[in-house]
Amino acid sequence: MPIKEKVMNIDGEEIDMEKDDLYEKLTFESANLIRRLSAYFIDLLGIIVIWYLVTKNMFQALDAFVAQLGINPYDFENLALYETFRDMVWETFLKGILFWLGIKLAYFTLVPSIFGNGQTIGKLLVGIGTVDYKTLNEVSPTRLMLREFVGRILIEHVFIIPYLVSMFMAFFSKDSRSLHDRIAKTIVIKLDLYRLE
């Protein structure tokens, strides 16, 4: 009687090849850091363009206020004008940050849902995609929301230390999984080596 060779998944668990038709799903390669960063910078350029188009009118009130300063020589000594200017700058800054985070969240959750296979425009161009870590199936939009909102926006962008930890995790781990990948149980793989059905 021939001895069957044990086939293990990425977690080291044995896969019954007769029960689970996952042989093709074992032949994948996680995306390296260079591909991931390339995709991220392409996506970042797109997000910057969208953010600029959405927020370009937001600075008009601040520009009009600054244009009127200096007409009267006492403007620069007026405490009320200083406080108004300070409040306008903080309000504009906070609105800009909130718009940035909202656009980034919408982009990283909606675009992969439209393209499928967890691909944004950058990931599509470099041939990678985000899939479920255990099954290598396409990630659901709610899981993408968890990955992006909790993992990337709340943890990595609000706090600097987890962001740096996430970068080191992606750089030094064997499967190049960052913190937001581990939270959502996803992995970014090369799609030119693995074909999702």
Image: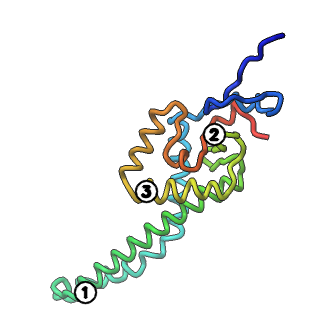
Give the residue at mark 1. 81
Around disc 3, counting alpha carbons within 10 Å, would you say few (fewer than 14), some (14 to 19), or many (20 or more)?
A: some
Image coords of residue 43 (percent x, y): 55, 51
Give the residue at mark 3. 157
Residue 160 vertical position relative to residue 74 in the rendered view, above or below = above
Q: Number of callouts in the render?
A: 3
Q: Residue at x 48, y 71 (%)?
A: 56
Q: Earlier in the sequence, mark 2 or mark 1?
A: 1
Residue 140 vertical position relative to residue 187 in the rendered view, above or below = below
Q: Residue at x 69, y 40 (%)?
A: 136
Q: Nearer the viewer, mark 3 or mark 1?
A: 3
Image coords of residue 6 (percent x, y): 71, 21
Q: Residue at x 53, y 39 (%)?
A: 177
Q: Is residue 169 left or right of residue 86?
A: right
Q: Is residue 177 left or right of residue 161?
A: right
Around disc 2, counting alpha carbons within 10 Å, would you say few (fewer than 14), some (14 to 19), or many (20 or more)?
A: many
Tell me which amino acid carries mark 1: Leu
Give the residue at mark 2. 128
Residue 89, by quadrant, is: bottom left
Tell me which amino acid carries mark 2: Ile
**Spatial CA span between label 3 and label 1:** 33 Å
**Spatial CA span between label 2 and label 1:** 52 Å
